[in-house]
């Protein structure tokens, strides 16, 4: 994901439908409705407030916030031409062509602030009609951002994934792949492309269900997920704890060895705790690393007692492990790497 202030990579990290004649109110949880492309006006409830769309947005600004979930979802839905400024980037992707797609998007020629995001005056100057933030804190006045009220005054609606309506780094619920589906469905409603959104969701569900069927009955391995390029300070501060990756792992027949170690998105275990852990497999998430394979080998050299080290059992992933439209890829890659006999 484009990584929020380097350390908050996964925050963003770490996250549709009506009848044609009247407005409707929907939330990210109401995934069963199916909208037609002409179903305007549409009212979306987002982070506790209602936003009405009389037509599909045409001047979209995507804030950075440590994610590529939002810009990737727009591209997956075929809405790249609606974007007038995008601040999200990651540099790697499991989706062929995705990195180049993102690089080609307009940036608005904005001078980003110290958080590598779009400050208030620059945002207002872009005259957007729709602004997406990775989390609700992207609309905080105290951080120098345009608030939702500021943007409403220039007739711009605002959105953050419903799973990220809290403050930065918080985990308000148990993140699952459904959060990715909910975001796709919300955007589908907003842009009048609900049918496309449902096709993407259905394809993802089918692919994941096929993997679950294959790995059923396989020994459940314990894995550690780590983002070497994100660690700051403590060397294991980027070991995954509570995140969407737990659901992804579970569907691939894998358990996060550090799930529940804390109440945070990242476990931050000590070296001693990592050494004592039963690690059958390793998931290395590439973030600005020149050689993720070397990162895995270095960890194996440091902890040769791991079963993962003895069997050289690891997989390298990037954006598919986070909130976004590509979680099926992560499920497939993890399952194939750790349960090859099932494929």
Image (cartoon, helix red, strand yellow):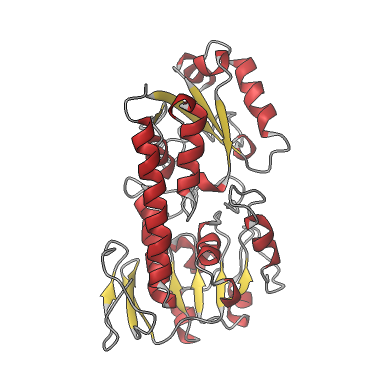
Q: Does 200 appear above or below 274?
A: below
Q: Position of residue 92 (x, y in %)?
A: 65, 48
Rendered image quadrant of residue 80 = bottom right
- In the image, is 119 to the left or to the right of 146? right
As rendered, which of 153 and 319 lies closer to the eye? 319
Left or right of 294, for residue 147:
left
Q: Which residue is drawn at 53% across and 27% down?
A: 282
Q: In the rendering, at what x and y percent does residue 83 appear? A: 59, 74
Across the whole image, how many numbered discs are drawn on residues?
Answer: 0
**Residue under the point 66% across and 68% down:** 105
Tell which residue pokes out farthest to the top in this image.
Answer: 305
Q: In which quarter of the image is residue 189?
A: bottom left
Looking at the picture, how far across and down is residue 254, in whole percent? 40, 30
Task: Identify the residue shown where x is 58% and y is 19%.
Answer: 312
Residue 18 in view of the camera: yes
Residue 162 in sight from this viewpoint:
no
Q: Is residue 219 above or below residue 332?
A: above
């Amino acid at each position: 994901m484009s990584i929020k202030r380097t350390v908050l990579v996964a925050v963003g990290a770490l996250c549709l439908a009506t009848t044609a004649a009247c407005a409707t109110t929907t939330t990210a949880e109401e995934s069963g409705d199916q909208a037609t492309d002409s179903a305007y006006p549409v009212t979306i409830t987002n982070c506790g407030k209602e936003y009405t769309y009389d037509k599909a947005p045409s001047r979209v600004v995507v804030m950075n916030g440590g994610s590529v979930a939002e810009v990737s979802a727009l591209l997956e839905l075929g809405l790249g031409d609606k974007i007038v400024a995008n601040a999200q980037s990651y540099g790697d992707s499991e989706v062929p062509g995705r990195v180049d797609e993102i690089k080609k998007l307009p940036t608005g020629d904005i001078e980003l602030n110290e958080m590598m995001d779009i400050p208030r005056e620059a945002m207002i100057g872009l005259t957007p009609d729709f602004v997406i933030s990775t989390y609700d804190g992207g609309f905080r006045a105290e951080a120098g951002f345009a608030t939702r009220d500021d943007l409403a005054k220039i007739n711009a609606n605002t959105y953050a994934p419903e799973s990220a309506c809290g403050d930065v780094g918080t985990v308000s619920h148990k993140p699952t792949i459904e959060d990715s589906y909910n975001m796709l469905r919300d955007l589908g409603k907003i842009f009048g492309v609900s049918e496309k959104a449902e096709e993407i969701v259905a394809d993802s569900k089918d692919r994941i269900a096929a993997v679950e069927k294959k790995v059923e009955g396989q020994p459940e391995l314990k894995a550690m997920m780590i983002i070497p390029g994100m660690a700051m300070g403590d060397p294991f501060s980027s070991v995954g704890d509570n995140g969407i990756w737990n659901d992804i792992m579970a569907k691939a027949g894998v358990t996060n060895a550090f799930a529940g170690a804390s109440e945070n998105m990242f476990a931050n275990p000590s070296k001693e705790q990592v050494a004592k852990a039963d690690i059958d497999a390793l998931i290395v998430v590439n973030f600005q690393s020149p050689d993720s394979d070397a990162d895995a080998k270095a960890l194996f050299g440091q902890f040769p007692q791991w079963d993962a080290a003895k069997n050289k059992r690891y997989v390298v992933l990037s954006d598919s492990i986070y909130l976004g439209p590509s979680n099926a890829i992560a499920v497939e890659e993890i399952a194939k790497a750790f349960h090859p006999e099932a494929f």
